[in-house]
Amino acid sequence: MKDLLNGWGLTAATFLPLVGLAVMMLIPKAEETLHKVVALVTSLAVFAIGVALIATFDYDKTGNLQFVVDKKWIQLINSRYIVGLDGISLPLLALTVFIVPLVVIYSWNHFPEPNNPKAFLALILLLETGMVGSFVAQDLILFFVFFEIVLLPMYFMIGVWGGEQRQYAAIKFFLYTLFGSALMIVSILATYSLSPKINIDGHLVHTFDMRLLSTWAGGGLARTTGILVFGGFFMGFGIKVPMFPFHTWLPDAHTQAPTQGSVILAAVLLKLGTYGFVRIAIPIFPQAAKSWAPAIGILAVIGIIYGALGCLAQTDMKRLIAFSSVAHMGFVMLGIATLTPFGINAAIFGMVAHGLITGMLFFIAGSVKDRFHTLEIKRLGGLLIQAPHMGWLLGLACMASLGLPGLAGFWGEFPAILSSYSPAAGLSLPLFRTFMVVAAIGTILAAGYLLWLLQRVAFGTPTEEFADEHIHDMHLTDYIAWVPMVVMILVLGFYPNLIFRVTDGAVIHSLAGVTKLGG
Amino acid sequence: MLAALAPVLAFARPAIDWHALAPEIILTATICIVLLVDVSTSERNRWATSSIAGIGMLAALIPILTLAVKGGPRIMFGGAYVVDDFALVLKALFLVAGYVTLLLSTNEIAEGDFWEGEYYLLVLSSVFGMTVMASARDLITIFIALEMLSIPAYLLAGWRKREVKGNEAGMKYYLMGVFATAVMLYGMSLIYGGTNSTVLAEIGRQIHGSFGKEPVAALGIVFVLVGFAFKVSAVPFHNWAPDTYEGAPIPITAFLSVASKAAGFVAILQLVFLAFLGRGDVIRPLMWILAALTMTVGNLIALRQTNIVRLFAYSSVAQAGFMLAPLAVVGSSASTTREVLQAVVGYLLIYTVVNLGAFAVIIAVGRKTKSGEISSFGGLFEYAPGLAVAMGAFLFALAGIPPLVGWFAKFQVFKALVSQGGASGITMAVVVGVNSVIALYYYANIARTMFMDAPPDGDRTPIRVPVPLLAAMGMAAAATLVVGFIPGVVAHLAEHATFALGG
């Protein structure tokens, strides 16, 4: 079993969804139930592989890549098929394989117009391949390909199944991200040609191998060159996160996307950006990361405040949650900007927590829309009376999102704020302490807009418009899809060490370059 | 009597390598057979010419494979005609592109108001000229090959002879082509005047030597390259392309936008790499400006198009810009030069397959909607999901989105540009990056229409795709999807497509 997982585990987890997709292609469109079953079975199989990987992962060596496969891929450019799992990838891989089956279950009888389960589920499976692949790839080109694979299915998901402004939102999402990717590929190639050659079978060649590049860590590189190359990565990942001035695609994409699309976007896709910083940009260019850190920190706190103020101005529930994503990702980026193990551990926790909580909020928003056919906050009210279960879950998700201790959100935000008290050596102490204060104010605003949302949607009495209408509380599929998420939010809230224990070793390992630089 | 014949007998026949010439000989034989069949059969049996032409092209691929297996460059006629790996890879590309063009044409030409026999004859002649071009390593041979491939193309462009647009297409293409040829010939005469040779290898030696330093060399180089810039429809020499593409029968548009363009690039590559590399200081800025203009202008005008064929005309202009881009750093170092060649050849291979696939879908959809407007693709996903998905794959491959094969083409361009390490390479890479984003907009716009709009006339009857079209589409789609995951195949071909320096 262990041998099989070592050799094939990650590859299977990555490509199994494609197998499911191929099977679905062979089934006629009319067999809707069969399509649902195939998609569910596939995603559950991937989940099972994920569980097996997590179970056999060696937690004493989280800093080392495990289950590594290293095979020839594109020989001409010496790009290799390298996959591996370490403490940084593991929580995110777990999040991905956990969320996708839930999304499929939620979809069971919630297919947005124009229905077509075959195409919809096929896109979800394609997304899963891209997401899993991105988190396990250890070769820059391989990573890039997976990173880009997610664009197409998400574009179609928003554009075909989305809301009224779907076409605008879809193309905006696509163009923004592609712009970042185009600059990122230039940086990837610059990294390739600037790094020293390595010896493979007696030939000296450049490499895309992230492991070797992280060991090189930009040694001997001119300061400005490093800053420019990091800039390309910053654009690619920063747009994906999204960081403050590049965030404008997100509210549109989230608001217009179908519920399932919003959940996947919030839970996993945004993390590709932050993961890219932690996995690629910082370990390979620690020196440049230090130069960039204050700028990233400033943009992060602007994002926190701006996102929160944006939330307060929203009239649409889904758009409010979308803006809250901007704020929460700001906390994650603040943790990353400190370049300390503490901050980055917090950031990874923040990613997982945000994935679960915001995913949950989008699920609920989707169901509210399903029942009331509107998400306009002022038309809603009294959810606790009409659909008490859903109302209580909304309350829980809001509490988790605003960072109430005991729930998962707390362990993402609080340590991130705390870590900016003492950033890595060489970073300006007063500056980061200012960030700390501003971010702390951001949490107050977060409490403000989330409680305000909860109060207006869940409390009070139903508005006249819906007072006499029968509102169905949660369906069975809702329970199946949401309960695991609620459980995870509680478990991680009570026992955050579940994640910190896994990430810590890997984070220290990946920050070796930064630590070596010293002051 | 014998004395009178003596001078004739004294003529020593140059050594002819029949094996190396086998593809061209097979094509010539096929041309003769098609001609004979055309004149000796009745109108309703003319469809046979299509099959014969197709078989001929496939048969011509066989000696290419055997030559590739045997390996080694074969140099003939004092270095004027060389069959090396570069020539073989591109000959194979031209034959495949020609064959796919036939698949696209069969139903279109048989059902329309067209002369059938002559049509296939001319396509074959044009492909023949292209295969010669791939081996031409001499100014005169290049010129002959160019005329050989262009003249049939002028005629084919005006094949819709009863339509004004068809006439315009042929006429415009012809006049512009002749003008370009004149400019090019003037450049060639300047170069010949200075070097006293027409063989590229010899010209290359002299350009590296004292002749290269003379201003007239730079002038000659610029004129020759500008002549071919017309052929590949680089801005500002692109004006003929949209009108010609729109007026020509669509299979011919496909043919012009890939095979004819590729032939222009082959000539440019041979001239630059074998003859002109000594004046990289002239070529680099020229190509930088041409490439940047071509992709930017092509893309910006493409954004405004509502007719799908015109959109593809401008998109193919922009794609030519992407292919010219690596030449902006050619000759700055040996390793960069090698990467430039790989990037351009790789791009040509990928672009040809994907663009032909896209045209196959355009033809298939056009058979039903009888319209060239982009809006006529509305709702395609509802009534022809297979076609819509295939077209989506081709579009996003053209835009360079992984995992579809196009990403690797763009990737190699980036790689060549970045490998130079200088400011001109990096800025060009950024220009390419920005243009990729602009291009995505109009490609995604077609995808949006297909997947997200309703059919404009509410007509949801499924589309019946004829077998030849389906075959063309299937091959292109399979290559687009599969090679995207294993781009090593293209890389391998492009890596081997290096020149043997003959002469």
Image (cartoon, helix red, strand yellow):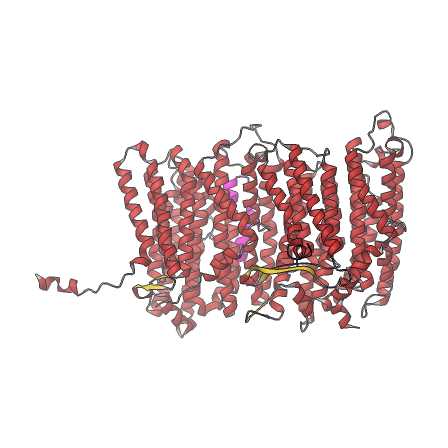
Question: Which of B240/B482 is in front?
Answer: B482
User: Magenta segment, which residues?
Assistant: B290-313
Query: Quadrant where the N terminus of chain A lies?
Result: bottom right
Name the residue located 71 percent from the left edge and 40 percent from the top edge: A104
Name the residue located 32 percent from the left edge and 31 percent from the top edge: B44
Farthest top residue in view:
A468
Task: Judge from the rendering whether residue A216 lies leftward or rightward of residue B302; answer left or right.
Answer: right
Question: Which of A345/A322 is in front?
Answer: A345
User: Where does residue A208 sit, x and y in percent of width and height?
Assistant: 62, 63
Task: Judge from the rendering whether residue A74 lies leftward or rightward of residue A3; answer left or right.
Answer: left
Farthest bottom residue in view:
B210
Farthest right residue in view:
A460
Question: Which of A344/A477 is in front?
Answer: A477
User: Where does residue B131 sit, x and y in percent of width and height?
Assistant: 37, 54
Vertical relation: A493 (above or below) B45: below
Farthest left residue in view:
B1
Whether residue B396 appears in this view of the structure is yes
- Name the dominant secondary structure of the magenta segment: helix
Task: Judge from the rendering whether residue B244 lies leftward or rightward of residue B148; answer left or right.
Answer: right
User: Where does residue A207 sit, x and y in percent of width and height?
Assistant: 60, 65
User: Where does residue A8 sit, x and y in percent of width and height?
Assistant: 64, 54
Q: Quadrant of residue B499?
A: bottom left
